[in-house]
Image: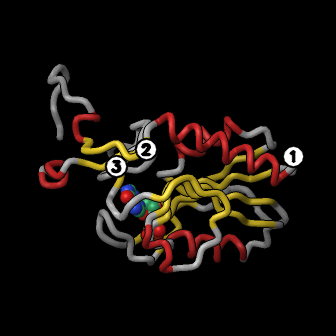
Amino acid sequence: MVQGPGSGYRLDDDIEDVLLSSDRIQARLVELAGEIDRDYAARPLLLVGVLKGAFVLMADLARHLSTPVEFDFMAVSSYGSATRTSGVVRIIKDLEIDIAGRHVLVVEDIVDSGLTLNYLLRNLRARGPASVEVFALLSKPDQTRVELPIRYHGFAVPNVFVVGYGLDYAERYRNLPYVGTLRAEVYSSG
Ligand code: IMP
């Protein structure tokens, strides 16, 4: 929906329903950050964000932690349509930090089929880290397709396409501070 300045268009106008408000997300992050702080008990932690979706979550989560953390990012692309993943994953950007002997926490925005995360975990475990755990803000019911050890989990969402808080549709809506669904017209207007 490309409209000129002054047209009065707001990103929010494309949203059908808000599923998770900004306040709910932040409150949950505070709880989960508390669990992480207790579990790691000041052991240095490497947060590995899965781009692009996790960048918003990483920034907010990390600021609630008191455990010492370092940051690195991976970017993966899954072959498939715009709204479904095929499970065939390609690494677009690899880590810069050697994770051998490190405590790693993979930070994912959403786990749908789990195929992306499944691939990433196998890849990361082969590099000899001291530990690898998973933080997923959202999960969908399909997740049961592969058995995944999600240690820190924010919210279950229904099997609908969601945007906001890092999640995009056609690269938009990542900057919305909440998670919601899009109005049907957005998909048809291309
Ligand atoms: P999976 O491999 O099926 O678990 O898919 C994981 C990836 O698909 C996520 O990291 C997202 O990039 C993307 N994805 C899955 N569901 C949604 C959604 O509802 N909105 C936006 N992106 C999604």
Residue to which mark 1 is pinned: 42
The amino acid type, in three-letter code, at marker 2 is: Leu
Work out whether mark 3 precedes mark 2 in sequence or the reverse, and give the earlier one. Answer: 2
Mark linked to residue 12: none
- Please determine whether, in this image, residue 163 is positioned above or below residue 108: above
Q: Position of residue 174 (x, y in %)?
A: 40, 43
Identity of the residue drawn at 70% across and 63% down: 133
Q: Where is residue 65 in the image (x, y as percent from the top left)?
A: 73, 40
- Count of marks placed on residues: 3
Nearer to us in this view, 111 or 117: 111
Identity of the residue drawn at 44% across and 36% down: 177
Q: Quadrant of the N terminus?
A: top left
Which SS class for mark 3?
loop
Q: Callout 3: few (<14), some (14-19), or many (20+) C-alpha neighbours within 10 Å?
A: few
Q: Quadrant of residue 84?
A: bottom left
The answer to whether marks 3 and 1 mark residues whose Cβ atoms lie closer than 8 Å is: no
- Marks 3/2: CA distance? 20 Å
Q: Where is residue 172 in the image (x, y as percent from the top left)?
A: 32, 45
Residue to which mark 2 is pinned: 20
Query: Does ligand 1 reach within 8 Å of label 3's beta carbon?
Result: no
| Position of residue 174 in the picture relative to residue 43 (left or right) | left
